[in-house]
Image (cartoon, rainbow, N blue to C red):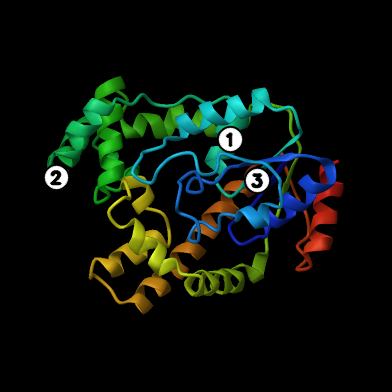
């Protein structure tokens, strides 16, 4: 079973309640909850909130680490193949969900080459991409070091340009919806209430000590972890580039933008049954469970 949708849709609470009813375990498809110690800002359910339900793909790597979608797929599928109980897949990362259930291929990676590229000048790497692919700016943000480095890494290892991947390989991966796993999926979406819920959740995170959490992680966060919405903005504040108020305002805007992208992603998937939103979590749980079974 899968319970999917944009951030702040109340997926976690519904998944836990359904898991309690049917004796299931939970497999998270959240790209940032995989990191240990990134708890408040990822809305990771606490041990108490998990209510004894076993959770998979949470707290599996340190924030210094890079953890690719391909690695997520490998470990997540191992969980699925060895599970003795029903699994409820839940989260907001559509790519990580599809990596678990669909036939997808991933571009190669090489740690030695990646380290070399990280020591290179961004302008030189961007020039390399432009030479190989005159249309690269339509597919890669050349001001984003992480995306440029990854594009050059793929280019050198496979010869595939960003344009080729966008128009053939990646498009084919994402457009076909060919599943390797039988599943039923529902989509939760708070709709017009999403932005209000995001503001309320971020305010609660702030009261719960999000700034101090990020401060404690300041020297430990790798490239991917530093890019997480909320963390990225607060790192900017803690490194002296903005005020705390500005950081939280930008974090709210970034989270709302993320929610819109997630909504678009999940609405494209014809296998997800969207159910009407209700604020009451008991009614939301009943509707989701009815749609799943």
**Residue at image location 65% in from the left, 70% down from the top:** 192
Q: Is residue 265 above or below residue 244?
A: above
Name the secondary structure under disc 3.
strand
Report the Cα–Cα distance between label 3 and label 1: 12 Å
Residue under label 2, please give it: 123
Q: Residues within 10 Å of mark 3 (few under 14, many from 20)?
A: many
- Which of discs 1 and 2 lies nearer the camera? The answer is 1
Question: Can the viewer see residue 257?
Answer: yes
**Residue at image location 50% in from the left, 33% down from the top:** 72
Which mark is drawn over residue 48?
A: none
Residue under label 1, please give it: 98
Q: Are marks 3 and 2 in contact (CB under 8 Å)?
A: no
In the foreground, 277 or 15: 15
Say which quarter of the image contains residue 185.
Answer: top right
Q: Is residue 71 left or right of residue 15?
A: left
Q: Is residue 185 above or below residue 131?
A: below
Locate residue 186, reporting x and y percent.
74, 47
Name the secondary structure under disc 1.
helix
- Which of discs 3 and 2 lies nearer the camera? The answer is 3
Name the secondary structure under disc 2.
helix
Q: Residues within 10 Å of mark 2 (few under 14, many from 20)?
A: few
Which mark is drawn over residue 90?
A: 3
Count of number-bearing discs:
3
Q: Are marks 3 and 1 in contact (CB under 8 Å)?
A: no
Report the Cα–Cα distance between label 3 and label 2: 39 Å
């Amino acid at each position: 079973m899968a319970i999917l949708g944009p951030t702040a849709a109340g997926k976690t609470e519904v998944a836990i309640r359904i898991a309690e009813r049917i004796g299931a375990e939970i497999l998270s498809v959240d790209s940032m909850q995989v990191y240990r110690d990134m708890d408040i800002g990822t809305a990771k359910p606490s041990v108490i909130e998990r209510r004894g339900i076993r959770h998979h793909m949470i707290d599996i790597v340190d924030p210094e680490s890079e953890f690719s979608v391909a690695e997520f797929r490998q470990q997540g599928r191992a969980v699925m193949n060895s599970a003795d109980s029903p699994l409820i897949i839940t989260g907001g990362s559509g790519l990580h969900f599809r990596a678990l259930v669909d036939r997808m291929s991933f571009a190669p990676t090489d740690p030695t080459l990646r380290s070399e590229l990280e020591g290179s000048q961004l302008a030189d790497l961007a020039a390399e991409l432009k030479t190989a692919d005159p249309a690269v700016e339509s597919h890669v943000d050349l001001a984003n070091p992480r995306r440029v480095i990854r594009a050059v890494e793929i280019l050198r290892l496979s010869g595939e340009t960003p344009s080729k991947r966008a128009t053939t390989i990646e498009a084919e991966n994402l457009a076909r919806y060919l599943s390797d796993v039988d599943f039923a999926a529902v989509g939760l979406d708070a709709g017009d209430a999403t932005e209000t819920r995001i503001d309320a959740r971020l305010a609660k995170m702030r009261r719960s000590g999000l700034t101090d959490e990020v401060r404690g992680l300041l020297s430990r966060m790798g490239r991917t972890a530093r890019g997480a919405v909320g963390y990225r903005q607060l790192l900017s504040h803690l490194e002296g580039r903005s005020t705390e108020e500005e950081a939280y305002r930008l974090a709210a805007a970034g989270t709302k933008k993320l929610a819109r992208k997630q909504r678009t992603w999940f609405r494209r998937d014809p296998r997800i049954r969207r159910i009407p939103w209700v604020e009451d979590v008991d009614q939301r749980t009943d509707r989701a469970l009815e749609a799943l079974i």
